[in-house]
Image (cartoon, rainbow, N blue to C red):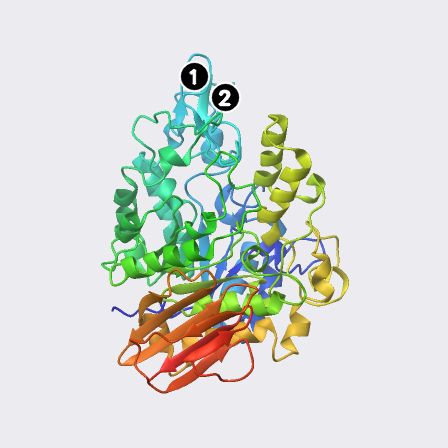
Amino acid sequence: MKKAWWKESVIYQVYPRSFCDSNGDGIGDLKGITGKLDYLQELGVNVIWLSPVYRSPNDDNGYDISDYQDIMEDFGTMADFDELLAQAHAHGLKIVMDLVVNHTSDEHAWFVESRSSRDNPKRDYYIWREPRNGKEPNNWGSFFSGPAWEFDETTGMYYLHCFSKKQPDLNWENPEVRDQVFKMMTWWCDKGIDGFRMDVISMISKKEGLPDVETNGGLYGHCSLGTCNGPHVHEYLQEMRNRVLSRYDLLTVGECAGVTIEEAKKYANSEGTELNMVFQFEHTDLDARLTPDGKWYKDKIDIVALKKLLSRWETELSEIAWNSLFWCNHDQPRIVSRLGDDSPRWRETSAKCIATCLHMMQGTPYVYQGEELGMTNYPFRSLSDFRDLESINAYHEWVDAGVRQPEELLEAIAYKSRDNARTPFQWDDGPNAGFTTGTPWIAVNPNYTRINAKEQLARPDSVFHYYQKLIALRRQSVDSELIVYGDYALILPDDPQLFAYLRRLGGKTLLVVCNLSGEKASFRKPDDLPAASARQLISNYPGEPAPYSLVMEPWQANVWVLE
């Protein structure tokens, strides 16, 4: 297998608004991140992925960009970014930017011109269509509820927005748009950044003719059915590779909603014609229902389905493409509340177990800020607690339509909302968890007095130190090559509690057994595994049991090297 620095890395996602506030305005900023580089260096990660820090009116927390080559005032200045980049590199940390080029803000200069008249030179930078029977041009629905079209009075036409109406979609069929995007990317690369995470990049090519899509019983059909993995997406990304990416040594990962394994092999193939890897979301959709409101329920992820799905991605991409490994990001609720047990008794144990299961797989692991502390979902009580546009819109859509009862839907949104990941980082047990001296832009989780970095840094058996050990094993141990590059094989596929698998390389075998349940479970080493000596690599329980036959405690994780 071809080796690469980004395969051997561990990436840490920083959501700047909620990480650390340096000036007391209640909003995290670039200077705040710079001030915490020692912490990230101690954790052991070597790449920081920054959620968007570009200039933005902030309708969708920075994913609505009005200037790609300037910094949002809330976060500081370009000089602050340059200092962060320099200091990160001095700490041995790389910086990956969030590239958001499926859409811009409606306040971007391109769109201001585009909407000014039908014959403006930038009119075709965006996707405009005439009304159909006095209404929207097709039946596509936005990710954020309602139609994916907004009528513009100035020119009497609709523009496409797969997200907020303040996020008009760019028209990638226009070569001038691609030129502008590639020019901007080159500017950032020349500045010295180390890669791009590409937001909804699988959506940049729409279906020819923008046809109606299935509605599945809802008022609108999901726009993803007309936008994901479109006819020219690989052509556009190959052009991006030829004109920009191939000129630099970058990490590139595409957020690819709706991606299949066969499509992933094109996006992230080992020949390097497009991207290094993709984010797929099949595993994060396992607790959703096949209904228009399917995200907004409190269903739990089925363990058998989870391990079969993740294993399929592991085995079918092997030698062809590369996996990205993640449980959490800024769009997902906290994994210890979602898959684990966030009660005081089991929170840390289950957080360690879930981390072990992921970090021993083949692929590049991503750690979302606070995940390394076992931060939990926030106890939302009312709609006014939320800041996330998707959550607020979903509540109004389904309650106003009489489909869902307010109390029941609010409980489900509290469980699944993106805001769970966006509450401030819990640095210590002081006011506002040490995040800010001002009033935080969104409330701090009240459990910060128990769950915070200061307490965990001082305690050797904390979740932080467990993540630190997992990361060191992958990056700096004698078993690193086995962990990074070893082949993967699932065992006990139908066991409803145990997620167990093997990694093999050069005559060594890694055996990983995780009890993803709150009940005891029996494990016996498969007979076809050699009766080799077993060296325990890591465990979240004390003692060093042999893997031949043992009772796994609730949320217990064990990893052995069989030699």
Q: Position of residue 431 (x, y in %)?
A: 77, 62
Q: Position of residue 147 (x, y in %)?
A: 49, 27
Residue type, mark 2 in image? Phe
Instruction: Relative to 346, say whether 282 is above or below.
Output: above
Instruction: Relative to 237, say whether 114 is above or below.
Output: above
Q: Secondary structure at mark 2?
A: strand
On the picture, is 49 further left or further right than 313?
right
The residue furthest left is 271
Q: Nearer the viewer, residue 60 or 530?
A: 530
Q: Nearer the viewer, residue 308 or 496?
A: 496
Contact? badges 2 and 1 (CB < 8 Å): yes
Residue 512 showing in the rendered view? yes
- Dividing the picture into quarters, in which one does residue 513 lie? bottom left
Q: Earlier in the sequence, mark 2 or mark 1?
A: 1
- Dividing the picture into quarters, in which one does residue 429 lie? bottom right
Residue at image point 44% right, 76% down? 559
The residue furthest bottom is 533
